Amino acid sequence: MADILDQLYPPHTAEDWDSVGLVCGDLDSTVTTVLCALDPTIDVVYEAIEIGAQMIITHHPLFLTGIHSVARATLGGRVIHESIAHGIALFNAHTNADQANPGVSDALAALLGVTDCVPLVPGDRVDTGIGRVGRLKDPMSLSDFAERVATSLPGSAAGIRVAGDPHQQISMVAVCGGSGDFLLPLAANLADCYVTSDLKHHKVLDHPRDLCALIDVPHYSSEWPWVPMVASLINLKSQGTVTCVVSTISTDPWTMHFTN
Ligand SMILES: [Zn+2]
């Protein structure tokens, strides 16, 4: 199973600061049922136990900074304890899944109807890299495209935010699953609209929004499209030996939204 994942998402393409691969578990264990989710939360582990999965694949790592304890009382420790107690391996593909083709931003682009995509920042190969830019088959106004973004992505309490003229025609669209404000200047040069998450006030304020409108979506929503994509890729590559199930749990931490 880890072989298939390493083929899809070569570990060496991950950023130096990142944490990817097996978090706990035994590479020699037999895996027949896998649960795919965005985050390795305790609720996701309980879901894996319920469906009898031997492995959980997530995008985000359980640990990204140095830790000194996996005591059960800690959030991460509980995940580790429950996983090991139930024979469940934890595996994650993070920035290596951002780089890959098809990767996290390809899944987002596909869901929004953005086609003929190329990377915003090329990676190892010409078709891999960070972010994507492509075109809408039928150009539309910013407000219509924002409506499409809102209805295509999984529902969230936070909703989506738009910066730009609602009547602006959108043809070229740049996307970046996850926190993508570092790609703003590149996106502005190439696209009429940039869809990403975690955009900061000053970045948006200083950005030429008349050239490139911005749509800020919840981090969870922007990366969620990768989850069903990795599940179907594994189902295909394992040739029926593994059943990959898409988690039904939302790990979006935001639960309420008030318009003020
Ligand atoms: Zn992320």
Image: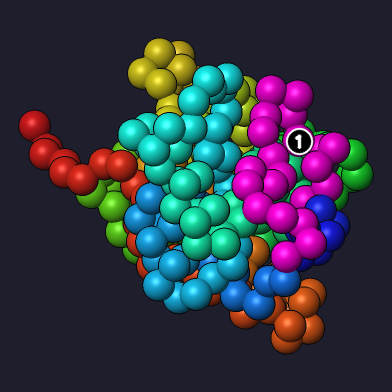
Magenta stretch contains residue 21 = yes
Q: Which residues are magenta?
A: 8-29
Q: Residue at x 75, y 24 (%)?
A: 16
Residue 172, compared with residue 231, is above or below; it is: above
Quadrant in the picture for the N terminus: bottom right
Q: Position of residue 142 (x, y in %)?
A: 41, 48
Which part of the image, by quadrant, shows the C terminus? top left
Q: How many marks?
A: 1
Which is more toward the observer, 124 or 212?
124
Above or below: residue 238 compared with residue 57: below
**Outermost residue, bottom direction?**
240
Evaluate whether residue 79 shows in this view. yes
> What crowding class fits label 1: few (fewer than 14 Cα within 10 Å), some (14-19), or many (20 or more)?
some
Q: Pick whichever, 85 or 144, lies toward us.
A: 85
Which residue occupies 36% across, 18% down? 201
Which of the two residues, 71 or 210, is positioned nearer the viewer here? 71
Give the quadrant of residue 187. Answer: top right
Element type at mark 1? loop
In the picture of the structure, the residue carrying the numbered disc 1 is: 14
Residue 2: image x %, image y %? 77, 58
**Does 112 sit left or right of 55 as displayed?**
left
Vertical side of 246 occupied by 24: above or below: above
Residue at (82%, 38%) from the top-left corner? 13
**Given the current orientation, which residue lies at the most extreme right position?**
125
Whether residue 221 appears in this view of the structure is no
- Where residue 196 sits: x, y (%)? 50, 39
Q: Is residue 152 left or right of residue 3?
A: left
Q: Residue at x 79, y 75 (%)?
A: 237
The quarter of the picture where residue 192 lies is top right
- The amino acid beneath tag 1 is Ala
Give percent across and percent down for residue 108. Answer: 56, 55
